[in-house]
Image (tube, helix red, strand yellow):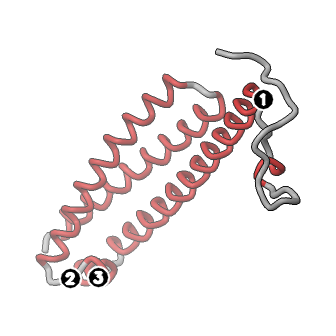
């Protein structure tokens, strides 16, 4: 197994993950400011980065398999190739960066869900529909409300 090749591959993966983290931060900013063009650009960048990361992970997995290790024993693979601990340190740094990206992605997903809920509430108000927690509660007869005493603010 070529130590230098594995180390270079891990550093390239880490660089890709760091770029993804930057992308996710840009995505959060675009979501917060409702900047559609920025969101499109970030989505394209994320897609390219994810494809690159998939190729890099595939190459790392291939090398591990060739050395007789499975994907679930990556640390053992690293330890076998590296007696000074450089690969293991890079691997742990990569895992930490991936965890950070996963967290940021969850945050961005939450921002999207909240935005969607606000939009649904606003559309409901414009349509004269009841929105909010009371819109899904049951009435005395066991049914949810189907009509309201409100009037629509306008029509399209």
Sequence-earlier tag: 2 or 3:
2
Q: CA distance from mark 3 to mark 1?
A: 69 Å
- Residue at left offset 26%, top offset 61%: 57
Sequence-earlier tag: 2 or 1:
2
Image quarter of the N terminus: bottom left
Q: Are marks 2 and 3 in contact (CB under 8 Å)?
A: no
Residue picked out by circle 3: 83
Residue 33 is drawn in which quadrant? top right
Estimate the x, y position of residue 47 in percent, counting from the top left: 35, 42
- Decide if residue 40 is on the left or right side of residue 77: right
Image quarter of the C terminus: top right
Estimate the x, y position of residue 153 in percent, counting from the top left: 79, 19
Residue picked out by circle 2: 69
Which of these two is toward me, 155 or 50? 155
Q: Nearer the viewer, mark 2 or mark 3?
A: 2
Sequence-earlier tag: 3 or 1:
3
Q: Are marks 2 and 1 in contact (CB under 8 Å)?
A: no
């Amino acid at each position: 197994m070529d130590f230098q090749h594995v180390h270079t591959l891990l550093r390239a993966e880490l660089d890709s993950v760091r770029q993804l983290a930057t992308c996710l931060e840009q995505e959060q900013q675009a979501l917060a400011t409702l900047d559609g063009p920025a969101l499109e650009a970030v989505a394209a960048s994320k897609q390219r980065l994810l494809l690159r990361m998939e190729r890099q992970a595939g190459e790392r997995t291939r090398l591990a398999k060739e050395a007789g290790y499975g994907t679930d024993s990556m640390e053992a693979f690293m330890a076998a190739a590296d007696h000074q601990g450089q690969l293991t340190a890079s691997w742990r740094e990569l895992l930490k960066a991936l965890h950070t990206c996963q967290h940021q992605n969850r945050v961005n997903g939450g921002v999207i869900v909240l935005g969607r809920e606000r939009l649904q509430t606003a559309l409901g108000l414009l349509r004269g529909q009841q929105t909010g927690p009371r819109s899904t509660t049951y009435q005395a007869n066991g049914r949810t409300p189907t009509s309201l005493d409100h009037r629509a603010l306008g029509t399209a």
